[in-house]
Image: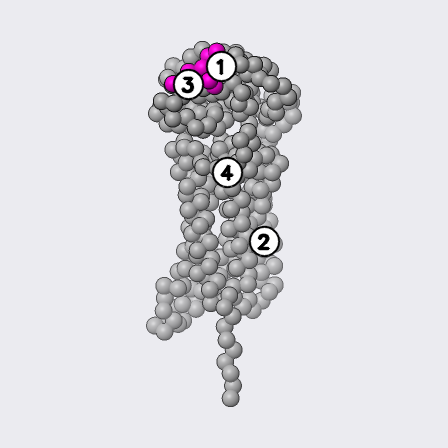
Amino acid sequence: MIRRRSTPWIHKWSRPLMGAIAGCGVLTTGYITIEKLTGGSAACLAQAGAKGCNDVLSSPWATVFGQPLALFGFLAYTSMMVFALAPLAIKPAENKEKRQKLENWTWLLLLVGAIAMSIFSSYLMYLLAFQIKAFCLYCIASALFSLSLLVLTIIGRDWEDIGQIFFTAIIVGMITLIGTLWVFSGVNQQVVTPGAPGQPVKISFTPQVQPNREFGWEITTTSGEAEISLARHLAKIGAKEYSAYWCPHCHEQKLLFGKEAEQIIDENIKVECADDSPKAQPELCKAAKIEGFPTWIINGQSYSGVQNLEELARVSGYTGSRNFKYFK
C-alpha cells in the first residue's frame, strides 16, 4: 500500500497567515496615513522627553513625492494581502488548473513584494536608528510584518528551483536599494554638518542646563528671509503654537525658525502652557485640549510634534520663499 505524503501544515496555512499579517500591515500603515493627512497625533509609547512616532511623522523622510510614506506602505500591504488570498477564492474541485496557475503567479509576486518590502524596511530602520533617532512602534511593527511575509513566502511552499529565490532576491534587492537611495537622495543631501555652505543644517537639541522660566533656552540660530516670511504668514492666518518653556522639542521648533522669526512667533502665535511660566495661559491650553508639546493649530487642524518649516508651509498654504536654513 502506497501512502500519500501529507502536506506540511505550514504549506496549508501559509497563505492565510500571510493574509493576516498583511492585514495587520494595512491597519498600521492606514492609521499612520490618516494621522499624517489629517495632522493628527499618533498614539505612541515613547518615554517622556524622548523622540517618538510624531517626530518620525514630521521628519523629512515621512513624505515621498508629496504624499505620506505610510500611504505607499498601505498600498504595498494591500497588494500582498490580495496576492496571498486571491487563489483561496477559487475552489480546487471546480477549477483546479486555474487555481494552480494563479497560485504560481501570486507566489512569484509575493516573493518579489516581500523581498522589496524587507529591504526598504531595513533602510527605514537604519534611518530610524541613526538619522531620526526616535522610537516608533508602528515603524518597527511594519518592519517585522515585512520580514515575516518574506519568511513565510520562502517556507510556505515547495520551491522546485531554490536558485530562483536567490536570483530573484539579487535582482529585486538591487533594484529596490537603488530606488530607495534615489527616493531619499534629496533628503539625505540635507543631512549635513552645520556650516556647510549653501545647504540646510540639521537641527537637534539636548539640554545641558535648566531652562529659564521666561524663555526656556537661548536661541542660537538666526533667521533667513524665508523663515521670517513664513512666521508672518502664520501670524496673519491666525495659527497657534502651544508650547512649554521646559520642553526640548519646543526649543527645537524655535531653532528651526531662528531668533528673528521666533520673535514674531512668540509675539503673535505662541501660547505658553507651563503653569509656572510668567507668560502662562493654561486656560487656553485646556480649552484647546492640548496633550503634548509643541502642538500647532493651523486652519482648524492640529499638528503635534516638531514640524519642519516645509511642512508648516504646506499645511498653511504659504506661497513665499522656501529656502529654509534648517530642518529636523
- Label 1: how many Cα within 10 Å (few below 14, some 14–19, many 20+): some
37 to 29, vertically: above or below: above
- In this rendering, the label closer to the viewer, 4 or 1: 1
Q: Nearer the viewer, mark 4 or mark 3?
A: 3
- Residue 174 in the magenta stretch? The answer is no
Q: What segment carries the magenta color?
A: 274-283
Residue under label 2: 171
Amino acid bearing label 2? Ile
Q: Are marks 4 and 3 in contact (CB under 8 Å)?
A: no
Q: Which residue is mark 4?
A: 45
Mark found first going from the N terminus, 1 or 3: 1
Disc 4 versus disc 1: distance between alpha carbons?
A: 28 Å
Closer to the camera: disc 2 or disc 1?
Answer: 1
Q: Separation of disc 2 and disc 1 at Cα?
A: 59 Å
Q: Position of residue 144 (x, y in %)?
A: 53, 49
Which residue lies under the disc numbered 3?
A: 282
Choose the circle earlier in sequence order: 4 or 2.
4
Q: Residue at x 41, y 32 (%)?
A: 40
Task: Give the x, y percent position of residue 69.
Answer: 47, 39
Residue 186 position in % (x across, y down): 55, 32
